[in-house]
């Protein structure tokens, strides 16, 4: 991929857990984390789940759905299994580890006690790669910034059960990663565009009746938000794209709460700005200059939210969100144009 003229591509740490876990499992043949993230389809939209919980990702999207989309789009396959009781799952993991590392997730990150401050469930999803296990500890590469972290088996099992993460299934693991088709990075990015257009088109109004279930990180409203994993409904009151940005601006100006601001500054803004910057570079690399320009502009607007939210300047954050709102229709139009 070539560098976008609309901004310097970002390099650094950030909450790219599933993209980095996939890259580890793919090994030397892995594309960049930027290409993997773009291939998941995450960057193309925004949603306000249940009308209260914001994510700068595509309407109805979840990380688990994104992992499957990326594997298929990049020409990879993996053996996926989940469910059962804890003992059966650990036996299964031990068996798979005899043949190589195993990607696990979603897990509840609050039980990852090797991370400072983590002492119990916080409703935060995560992915990691297990490299070893013995009778007392699991050794894993935690892409949050902890290579070869050792985690007590009991804590790992609680995390892996993921009963506070409202998407996916308990004890999900992926192993046996193999390339089944030679797909270039450019082809994978291009293949993500039709689904991106669908999500941008479908997410312009409140979601209809829905069965709750979805994602994700801090804050209990996440537990009501997830059935879109397999194309199912999203929670009642969910807003997408421009409507989501405008409604979030109103929420912040009305005062919001500490949980909302913490979620935005510690997770949603960071990952949202990064995936948009990566999508811009990827779109530029396949000659989609107009769409690259829109996503670059979006990345700047989302990234610019960090300081006002961290310092309590909700008026400035609301202004940026209102500037962001019309860009989703512009992005759809740019993607629809040849």
Image: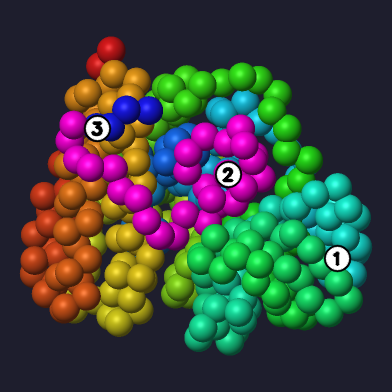
State the image coordinates of residue 329 (x, y, percent, origin top left). Answer: 21, 34
Residue at left 16%, top 78%?
Answer: 311
Residue at left 30%, top 70%?
Answer: 265
Q: Dot 3, crowdedness within 10 Å: few (<14), some or many (≥20)?
A: many
**What residue would you read off at disc 1?**
90
Residue at left 60%, top 79%?
Answer: 114
In depth, the one of 252 and 17 nearer the eye is: 17
- Of labels 3 and 1, the one closer to you: 3
Q: Secondary structure at mark 3?
A: loop
**What residue would you read off at disc 3?**
4
**What residue would you read off at disc 2?**
23
Q: Earlier in the sequence, mark 2 or mark 1?
A: 2
Can you tell which quarter of the image residue 147 is in? bottom right
Q: Earlier in the sequence, mark 3 or mark 1?
A: 3
Q: Residue pushed farthest top?
A: 338
Magenta part of the chain? 5-33
Count every numbered label the image shows and give the total.
3
State the image coordinates of residue 197 (x, y, percent, origin top left). Answer: 36, 29
Seen in the image, is 302 located left or right of residue 279? Answer: left
């Amino acid at each position: 991929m070539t560098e976008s003229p609309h901004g310097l591509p970002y390099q650094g740490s950030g909450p790219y857990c599933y993209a980095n876990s996939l890259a580890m499992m793919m090994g030397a043949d892995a594309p960049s984390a930027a290409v993997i993230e773009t291939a998941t389809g995450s960057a193309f939209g925004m949603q306000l789940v249940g009308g209260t919980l914001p994510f700068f990702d595509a309407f109805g999207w979840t990380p688990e759905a994104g992992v499957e989309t990326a594997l298929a789009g990049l020409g990879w396959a993996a053996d996926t299994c989940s469910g059962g009781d804890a003992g059966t799952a650990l036996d299964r993991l031990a068996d798979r580890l005899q043949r190589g590392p195993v990607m696990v997730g979603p897990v509840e990150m609050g039980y990852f006690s090797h991370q400072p401050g983590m002492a119990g469930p916080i409703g935060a999803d995560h992915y990691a790669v297990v490299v070893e296990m013995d009778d007392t500890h699991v050794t894993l590469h935690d892409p949050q910034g902890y290579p070869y972290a050792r985690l007590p088996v009991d804590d790992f099992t609680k995390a892996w059960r993921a009963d506070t993460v409202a998407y996916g299934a308990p004890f999900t693991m992926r192993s046996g990663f193999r390339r089944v088709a030679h797909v270039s990075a450019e082809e994978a990015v291009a293949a993500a565009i039709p689904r991106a257009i669908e999500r941008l088109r479908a997410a312009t109004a409140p979601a209809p009746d829905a069965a709750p279930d979805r994602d994700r990180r801090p804050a209990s409203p996440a537990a009501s938000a997830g059935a879109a994993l397999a194309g199912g409904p999203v929670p009642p009151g969910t807003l997408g794209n421009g409507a989501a940005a405008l409604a979030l601006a109103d929420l912040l100006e009305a005062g919001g709460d500490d949980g909302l601001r913490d979620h935005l500054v510690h997770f949603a803004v960071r990952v949202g700005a990064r995936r948009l910057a990566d999508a811009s570079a990827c779109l530029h690399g396949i000659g989609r200059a107009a769409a690259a320009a829109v996503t670059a502009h979006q990345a700047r607007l989302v990234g610019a939210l960090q300081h006002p939210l961290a310092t309590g300047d909700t008026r400035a954050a609301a202004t940026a969100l209102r500037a962001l709102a019309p860009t989703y229709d512009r992005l759809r139009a740019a993607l629809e144009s040849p």
